[in-house]
Amino acid sequence: MNAGAAVPKKSPTSPAPSDATETVVLGEADVARALTRIAHEILERNKGAQDVVLLGIPTRGVPLALRLADRLAHVEPGLDVESLVGELDVTMYRDDLHKHPTRAIGTTTLPASGIDGKVVVLVDDVLYSGRTIRAALDAINDLGRPRAVQLATLVDRGHRELPIRPDYVGKNLPTSASERVRVRLAEVDSADGAPVTDAVTISQSASGATTEAAR
Ligand SMILES: O=P(O)(O)OC[C@H]1O[C@H](OP(=O)(O)OP(=O)(O)O)[C@H](O)[C@@H]1O
Ligand SMILES: O=c1cc[nH]c(=O)[nH]1
């Protein structure tokens, strides 16, 4: 799939957006293809997954990390998904805690082998200002000393405020600051038992406020 400029399109596998102003930029099949490609890129870059640990950043980075781990294990059948994947809560490391003091603290779970000497691949759904990843790097610093840290994101929407760039990108999605990118994943977004298919949508944020201001 093309990781270049965004071409908004209707996907035959995507759900009808709940908001009429939302444009679907990736449907279920697009998300699956992007993750498969990223899994292969991780294997190529690291010459296998022997020392790789995937750390998903809540909320949606966690199921994405699990899906990537499944794909890595599919390509390298000896791999144990459990020992490949973990979850990294960055809440206490955020630089906007004073603005959002009520953020719930999440869970950090590392694979039994830990992260010392490993190649840690941080996994998130959207990369925007880069502040979440900055917080993740601080969190990792308190947990161990990986050999390297890499970053995988399903969507890079630009507008970086820090010198952070992803190593693996599902889709580069040029946006304006007044737009909102939403990622819906079956694992976390199914409401009241009603299944939701994966989708990435873009819409104008309410009142045209920048996403950062709207948070
Ligand atoms: O690059 P940044 O400007 O930090 O933005 C990207 C982050 O914003 C979203 O998370 P959010 O804080 O909305 O939490 P959520 O994933 O639990 O919805 C998204 O999932 C990324 O983690
Ligand atoms: O548009 C945005 C910006 C940050 N995080 C998101 O999930 N969407």
Image (spheres, rainbow, N blue to C red):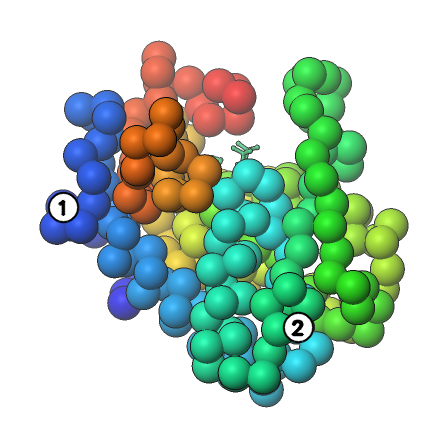
Instruction: Bin the neighbour count of mark 2 within 10 Å (Cα to Cα): few under 14, some 14-19, many 20 and up.
Output: many
Residue drawn at 39 percent across, 69 percent down: 36
Q: Residues within 10 Å of mark 1 (few under 14, many from 20)?
A: some
Which amino acid, by three-letter code, is at mark 2?
Answer: Val
Q: Nearer the viewer, residue 81 or 24?
A: 81
* Secondary structure category for the residue under label 2: strand
Q: Nearer the viewer, residue 9 or 113?
A: 113
Residue at figure coordinates x 46%, y 70% from the top left: 71
Residue at the limit of the structure toward the bottom, as seen here: 47
| 173 with respect to 109 (left or right) | left
The quadrant where ligand 1 appears is top right
Q: Earlier in the sequence, mark 1 or mark 2?
A: 1
The residue sitting at the front extreme is: 193
Q: Position of residue 121 (x, y in %)?
A: 63, 63
Count all numbered tags in the image, as a single digit: 2
Q: Is residue 32 above or below residue 90?
A: below
Asked if 92 appears above or below 166 in the picture, the reply is above
- The image quarter containing residue 86 is bottom right
Q: Residue at x 59, y 60 (%)?
A: 151
- Quadrant in the picture for residue 92: top right
Query: Which quadrant is home to the N terminus?
Result: bottom left
Q: Does the image show residue 193? A: yes
Mark 2 highlights which residue? 52
Amino acid type, callout 1: Lys
Residue 168 appearing in the image = no
For the residue pair 75 and 172, the one nearer the viewer reads as: 75
Q: Is residue 156 left or right of residue 8?
A: right
**Relative to 90, 37 lies left or right:** left
* Label 2 lies in ligand 1 vicinity (Cβ under 8 Å): no
Give the x, y percent position of residue 69.
54, 66
Give the residue at mark 1. 10
